[in-house]
């Protein structure tokens, strides 16, 4: 059982001394749960949206539940219980109804008339005997209802305090067992404060009509009870205990929702012992948690044995649902015991495969062979399959809806076997490779050397190839004997050719100078060239008239001291040179220019 108490909204002149009043937040319940909604005791009245007028109700279905509770002040109505006499003036009210004038049915024989008495039966022969609401022995106001809408049954004016909440209420009954009941409504200052409300169809069943009103700026309240019924037959009623008083009102509401949470354990499963299947449960609301009765905490599981599997699911709101699925695992007390295979001869289809089962089977055992290979269209429904060629053959055995599987390779009894070697298998281009055929059982041989060359041979004679280009070459040798063959592969790796590196000659250069001063100061006293890598040079130096003053042939380390061939010092001035030189790598250099001789 759940209980909840909702936050407060206060209206009117409540001063805080009233009992605390609150509910919880909107609530989600699980199917089968109920909710106790409780308002504290101490209020004068309670009005639930369900019509109940108690402090506590029990909620068993979804909906919005609201309650109004109030503390009522002193009644401002005079003689609202009609105990002051039998006239309207004695009880200080006005009415559109006339006092009863009598007739063949009694005092209230005519519609639109009223009377104050202790029982309706005292005023009309067809009215039932009822006690008043106040004490059970006092007065009430009875009426033979008028058939004109908006007829004032009772009215009184009272002084009120502005900006105050008030409650206006009274009790009423039907005084004759007729479904055409009165339609009563409360007005204050000509404004309706309640909807039109019928009296109970059952006679003498007191019910209350109540409405709330805030005085605003008004200082008087004109109170009216009005009958809106227009029927002539029936429409007979009594009223009592009219009450108008200031009120402290508190109200709130709560939304109650029922979660329709379910879980499905999935369909019943039947499978064989050598297989598996999965129970997959699902809930109609996401985010649920799951636990199976065998402890598995997941929405799915692979059941390990036969039996009933129950899953319990819990929603995020704490609602719990269960469901079950039956699992039947077929026992498989049989097995594939023996597979026989007879190899085929090379070039012939004379092999066979066969199977035997062991253990305990039920009824007929069915065999299915297929092959060779997994995608072959060839098959036979028998335990023995003859006249077969080489390859893999696949067996399916079925008994009582359960299957076992196996496979076997049917081989050739005398197959060719390819074997290949080579020397070398790697080296720089161009690479000459000798191949040796070590195969057995073959009588024809196909070579593919991987370089675009192929060769067919009828013997195991060796082969050779020259590979000129760098790369990796896959060599294939196929040995064949009739329809039987075998293939072997070998790789030849050809690397970059070897490179012979010539010794590097030293760099050479030749740079003439243009000034020298042969004056004996040990600085720039001779003329020469700046050279490197020169093996020989021929040079001729002449004066400005073209007369030779210095010459050397083939001598790389020459020096001119500024003297002519006779040993005489040459005069200052400009001199001209021509040269031809040969570098260490044989390159010829030549040139001409001028120089300055200074003393």
Image (spheres, rainbow, N blue to C red):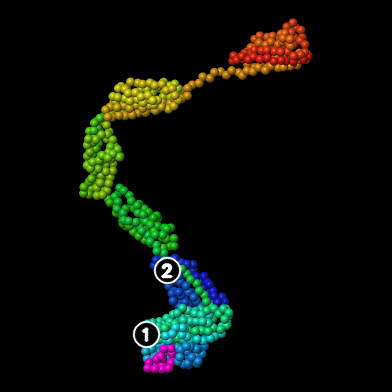
* Residue 310 shows in this picture: no
In the depicted structure, whether residue 313 falls above or below residue 444: below
Judged left or right of residue 421, residue 75 is right
Q: Residue at x 38, y 83 (%)?
A: 180
Q: Nearest the camera: 365 or 107?
A: 107
State the image quarter where residue 163 is shown. bottom right
Nearer mark to the viewer, of 1 and 2: 1
- Image quadrant where one finds the C terminus: top right
Q: Position of residue 306 (x, y in %)?
A: 30, 54
State the image quarter where residue 148 is shown. bottom left
Judged left or right of residue 463, residue 87 is right
The range drawn in magenta is 100-115
In the depicted structure, whether residue 386 falls above or below residue 269: above
Residue at the far top in the pictured view:
566
* Residue 548 shows in this picture: yes
Which secondary structure lies at badge 2? Answer: loop
Q: Position of residue 538 (x, y in %)?
A: 66, 10
Q: Classify mark 2: residues with Cα within 10 Å, few (<14), some (14-19) or many (20+).
A: some
Q: Nearest the camera: 589 or 46?
A: 589
Q: Main secondary structure of the magenta part?
A: loop
Q: Position of residue 239 (x, y in %)?
A: 45, 86
Magenta stretch holds residue 114: yes
Residue 62's mark? 2
In the depicted structure, whether residue 331 falls above or below residue 557: below
Judged left or right of residue 539, residue 83 is left
User: Marks 1 and 2, how far apart in space?
Assistant: 35 Å
Magenta stretch holds residue 536: no
Q: Residue at x 74, y 11 (%)?
A: 544
Q: Position of residue 429 (x, y in %)?
A: 45, 22
Which secondary structure lies at badge 1? Answer: loop
Residue at the far left in the pictured view:
363
Q: Which residue is mark 1?
A: 177
């Amino acid at each position: 059982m759940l209980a909840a108490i909702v936050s407060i909204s206060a209206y009117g002149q409540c001063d805080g001394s009233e009992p605390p009043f609150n509910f919880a937040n909107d609530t989600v319940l699980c199917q089968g749960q109920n909710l106790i909604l409780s308002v504290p005791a101490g209020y004068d009245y309670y009005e639930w949206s369900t019509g109940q007028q108690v402090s506590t109700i029990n909620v068993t279905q979804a909906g919005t539940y609201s309650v109004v509770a109030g503390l009522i002040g002193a009644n401002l109505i005079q003689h609202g219980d009609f105990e002051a006499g039998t006239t309207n003036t004695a009880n200080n009210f006005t009415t559109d109804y006339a006092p009863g004038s009598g007739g063949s049915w009694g005092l209230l024989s005519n519609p639109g008339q009223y009377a104050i008495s202790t029982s309706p039966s005292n005023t009309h022969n067809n009215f039932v005997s009822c006690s008043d609401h106040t004490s059970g022995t006092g007065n009430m106001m009875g009426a033979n209802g008028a058939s004109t809408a908006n007829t004032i049954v009772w009215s009184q004016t009272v002084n009120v305090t502005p900006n105050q909440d008030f409650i206006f209420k009274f009790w009423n009954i039907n005084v004759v067992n007729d479904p055409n009941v009165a339609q009563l409504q409360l007005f204050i200052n000509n404004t309706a404060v309640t909807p039109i409300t019928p009296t109970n169809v059952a006679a003498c069943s007191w019910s209350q009509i109540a409405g709330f009103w805030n005085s605003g700026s008004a200082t008087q309240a004109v109170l009216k009870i009005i009958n809106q019924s227009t029927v002539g037959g029936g429409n007979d009623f009594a009223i009592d205990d009219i009450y108008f008083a200031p009120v402290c009102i508190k109200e709130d509401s709560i939304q109650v929702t029922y979660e329709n949470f379910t879980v499905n354990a999935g369909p019943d499963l039947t499978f064989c012992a050598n297989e598996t299947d999965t129970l997959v449960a699902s809930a109609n609301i996401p985010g649920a948690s799951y636990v199976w009765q065998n402890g598995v905490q997941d929405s799915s599981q692979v059941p390990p044995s036969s039996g009933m599997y129950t899953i319990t699911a819990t929603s995020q709101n704490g609602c719990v649902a269960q469901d079950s699925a039956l699992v039947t695992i077929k026992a498989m007390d049989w097995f594939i015991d023996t597979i026989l295979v007879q190899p085929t001869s090379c070039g012939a289809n004379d092999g066979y495969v066969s199977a035997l089962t062991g253990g305990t089977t039920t009824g007929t055992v069915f065999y299915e062979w297929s092959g060779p290979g997994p995608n072959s269209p060839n098959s036979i429904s028998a335990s023995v399959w003859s006249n077969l060629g080489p390859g893999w053959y696949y067996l399916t055995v079925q008994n009582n809806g359960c299957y076992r599987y196996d496979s076997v390779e049917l081989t050739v009894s005398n197959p060719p076997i390819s074997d290949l070697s080579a020397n070398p298998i790697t080296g720089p281009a161009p690479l000459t490779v000798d191949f040796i055929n070590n195969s057995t059982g073959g009588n024809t041989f196909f070579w593919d050397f991987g370089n675009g060359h192929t060769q067919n041979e009828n013997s195991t004679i060796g082969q050779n190839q020259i590979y000129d280009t760098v790369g990796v070459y896959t060599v294939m040798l196929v040995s064949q004997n009739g329809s039987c063959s075998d293939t072997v592969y070998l790789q030849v790796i050809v690397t970059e050719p070897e490179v012979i590196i010539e010794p590097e000659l030293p760099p050479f250069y030749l740079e003439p100078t243009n000034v020298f001063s042969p004056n004996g100061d040990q600085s720039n006293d001779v003329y020469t060239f700046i050279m490197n890598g020169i093996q020989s040079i021929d040079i001729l130096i002449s004066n400005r008239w073209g007369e030779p003053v210095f010459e050397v042939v083939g001598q790389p380390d020459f020096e001119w001291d500024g003297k002519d061939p006779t040993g005489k010092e040459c005069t200052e001035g400009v001199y001209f040179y021509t040269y031809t030189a040969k570098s260490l790598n044989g390159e010829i250099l030549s040139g001409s220019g001028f120089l300055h001789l200074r003393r």
